Amino acid sequence: MSIGNRSLRSSTRHAFIEAVHGENRLRLGVLGSGKGSNFVAIAQAIADGSLPAEVGVVISDVEGAGILQHARERGIPARFIAPGAFRTKLDPDSEAAFIGALREARVDLVVLAGFMRILKGGFLKAFDGQVVNIHPSLLPSFPGLEAWKQALDYGVKVTGCTVHLVDQGVDTGPILAQRAVPVLEGDTAASLHQRIQEAERTLYPETLARWARGGLGRRIPAASSQPPA
Amino acid sequence: MSIGNRSLRSSTRHAFIEAVHGENRLRLGVLGSGKGSNFVAIAQAIADGSLPAEVGVVISDVEGAGILQHARERGIPARFIAPGAFRTKLDPDSEAAFIGALREARVDLVVLAGFMRILKGGFLKAFDGQVVNIHPSLLPSFPGLEAWKQALDYGVKVTGCTVHLVDQGVDTGPILAQRAVPVLEGDTAASLHQRIQEAERTLYPETLARWARGGLGRRIPAASSQPPA
């Protein structure tokens, strides 16, 4: 086959060109509530070529969140969507707005990066098996909030971080990757949290890159997985 | 101070000589039900000088257990004590016999090395805070039996082993040390178990050595902790 082959059907050629030009790269929709350090690590991995993906949109439930500012600085669409009246989840209108914005941005994978609300059935059904999270412990130990503090209080000597698919439970979904982090003598909650976050900032982009390359069960569209004959 | 100092009081001098000659070394009582690979690792660490301890007795609830044979080969007192009618614990007479044998051997620390019965209140009261175990997972994940298989079935990417003090719960006591072990692509329960056991065979002697040197809350007798003035 040559690109100049006149017999190449237009739709096939379009798919081939997309694959060559990376237009069919994994599109991420990133949700975060905080300063966005994991988002920055992901954006840097995309910029340096180690993560074959692009960020379609960054959405926050917190209007002044640093993650939105980081997105704007990089020219990435950044949206605040008000979460509604609940403290720990999105209200129905907000959930619908989140889903709509992610679909509008045509994202393949929803990436939670410090998103502090629990996503419920409606959202998870809309992006079935396509929502990933990073959690600051070696799950199944220490699900829930402040996992680094739970680990320190329990007295473990090894903790870490976990990238997992999000399901209906709290930090119970299938595990994609984990990295161990030692608890050191004299660690405080803050020092341990910082060391875990450093591990997260390498583990998350690496795991997304494996996903993007199809090594973790990503459903790669036919256009890029089947080159034209 | 010099050893020849005539003013050195006899009892103090005796303590000093004990410390120098290692007569006050940590005395271990090892309990096991199986082949004794962790006991062998401990005995080797004692032999090569990295673990300043000695094994006062090895006791098994299984008459033909390999651990007893390994002890006899090393000239270490090895005893079978019948466990009684229960399947998962010692009956009262057996518990009393275990306690008696460990006291007779003047052990400072009871080391569980593949001992397959749960030790109950009476035993734990007799050796309060002086019973250690090694468990083949990163506790608090996967307490109980076949922890490596539990880890594989759950789908974690990092597991490991844990040395902990034994309390009334199942694998819930204070953690002394942990080591991470990766779960590899294609691991079976057997291959993962083997990799965890390799980690155990270094972690257990190292942790006992830290205990023996007083770095883990060992109550060191005054004779060795206070050198003569």
Image: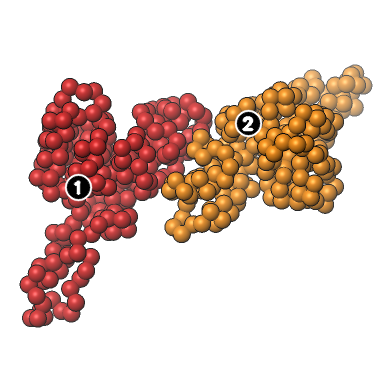
Chain colours: A orange, B red
Q: Nearer the viewer, residue A215 or A101?
A: A101
Chain letter of disc 2 in the image: A
Asked if one can make out residue A171 in the rendered structure from this viewpoint, the answer is yes
Q: Position of residue B145 (x, y in %)?
A: 35, 28
Q: Which mark is residue A175?
A: none
Q: Position of residue B220 (x, y in %)?
A: 23, 59
**Residue labelled with disc 2:** A165
Q: Amino acid at mark 1?
A: Leu
What secondary structure is found at the residue carrying circle 2? strand
Q: Amino acid at mark 2?
A: Leu
What secondary structure is found at the residue carrying circle 1? strand
Chain letter of disc 1 in the image: B
Q: How many marks?
A: 2
Q: Position of residue A116 (x, y in %)?
A: 67, 41
Q: Which mark is residue B28?
A: 1
Tell whether B51 sits left or right of A104: left
Q: B41 above or below B115?
A: below
